[in-house]
Image: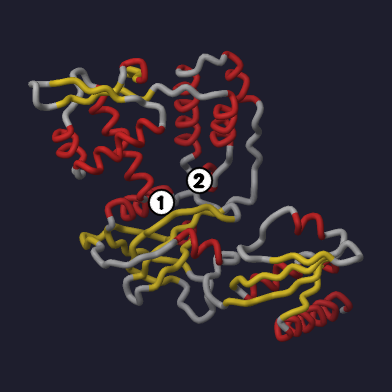
Amino acid sequence: MAAAKNLIQFMKAFELLSRPGGISIGELQEKLEISRRSVYRLFDSMEELGYPLVDSSLDGRTKSWSMMSEYVASRPAGRVPRLSLNTGEMMILYQILSRQTPLYESGMKQTIGALRKRLEQFYLENSEDTDLQNFGELFLSLPGQYKHLEGKESIYETLLKGALEKRCCRGSYRSFSADSPEYRDIEFVPIRFFEWNYGLYCLIYRTSDKAVRTMALERFESVRLTDRPFREKFSIDAEKMLEKAWALTFDDEISVVIRFSAEAAPYIREREWQKGQSIELETDGGLLLKMTTSGRRDIKSWIMSFGRDAELIEPADLRGEIREELISLTEKYEN
């Protein structure tokens, strides 16, 4: 959410600096509700992004700051930065715009499509590369096994508003846990959003036990904003939490050693499965993957998905669980 707040602040500053006559440091402080030091940091960011500022005297004592006119594009909705993207940057933009998201298959499909068209038009208007017209035809958007989010649009918007305004929410959430009721009424604060495995998830802070949990958007039956602001002070490194998690499981840490066959080895080597992992090559072309992660059940399912191309070496107790499950499967298919 900090990134979104900074972007909004940047665009407000740009609009103020683009108006005729510019604006003073004091006015910027008042309009943006930031310190004088933060104003100068904002100026530095603009300069780094290639938007030069000029200053002039207002009354012999106060300076007025403004954006150079050639870096501003006038549009009906206001003034916006004039962007000059090279071919590589434009290709990345089109790839992002062409990418499917979990929300695309929900009722937001038309909204996303309209936004894509508006973004394409904006960037094409601000580019001198005539070949960019063809970029829209280069990238395909393939369907995937997306979770069903139809009817969840208002829930998503409420969660976003709760995160931005730092307000507590109450919601009814459907649980798959055997030791929990099917529907739970919880009070929480939305913190961060992320996509994973064709689904959209929300990292929340649960006020009842001060726990951080991952909630799947499609399992919310209802969400409403409360009048209670969230004022508790707590620190969370969301990126680090997700980096250590395996299949969104944060606890139940486990260290594993897995042997992969020569056939599976190229696939295993081409990506990083977990931070701090190590790979040992074997003489037959196979390899040993060693890593510490979380979620015994999820790791077990992942190993078994490779069939005979993967063998869990350690830990011994989890190896035993896999053996018992394979025996059970064999009996099932023999009957």
Q: Amino acid at mark 1?
A: Tyr
Taking depth in this image into account, of 294 and 108 the one nearest to the observer is: 294
In the image, taking residue 215 as reference, residue 196 lies left or right, namely right
186 versus 161 height, above or below: below
Looking at the rendered image, the quarter that the C terminus falls into is bottom right
Left or right for 218, reference 299 = left
Residue 275 location, x and y as percent?
61, 63
24 to the left or right of 84: left
- Residue shown at 57%/13% (left/top)? 130
- The residue drawn where x is 9% and y is 21% is 60
Q: For numbered disc 2, what is the local secondary structure?
A: helix
Total numbered circles: 2
Does dot 1 land on a helix, a strand or a loop? helix
- At x 28% / y 57%, what residue is drawn? 166
Badge 2 or badge 1: first in the primary sequence: 2
Inspect the image, locate mark 2, and give the three-letter code of the amino acid beneath it: Leu
The answer to whether 181 is drawn above or below residue 284 in the figure is below
Residue 76: percent from the left, percent from the top?
Answer: 31, 19
From mark 2 to mark 1, how far is it between C-alphas?
Answer: 9 Å
Q: Which mark is residue 156?
A: 1
Residue 294 in percent (x, y) is at 59, 72
Residue to which mark 2 is pinned: 103
Q: Nearer the viewer, residue 256 or 326?
A: 256
Q: Looking at this rendering, what residue extends furthest in the front direction?
A: 60
The residue lying at 47 percent from left, 22 percent from top is 84
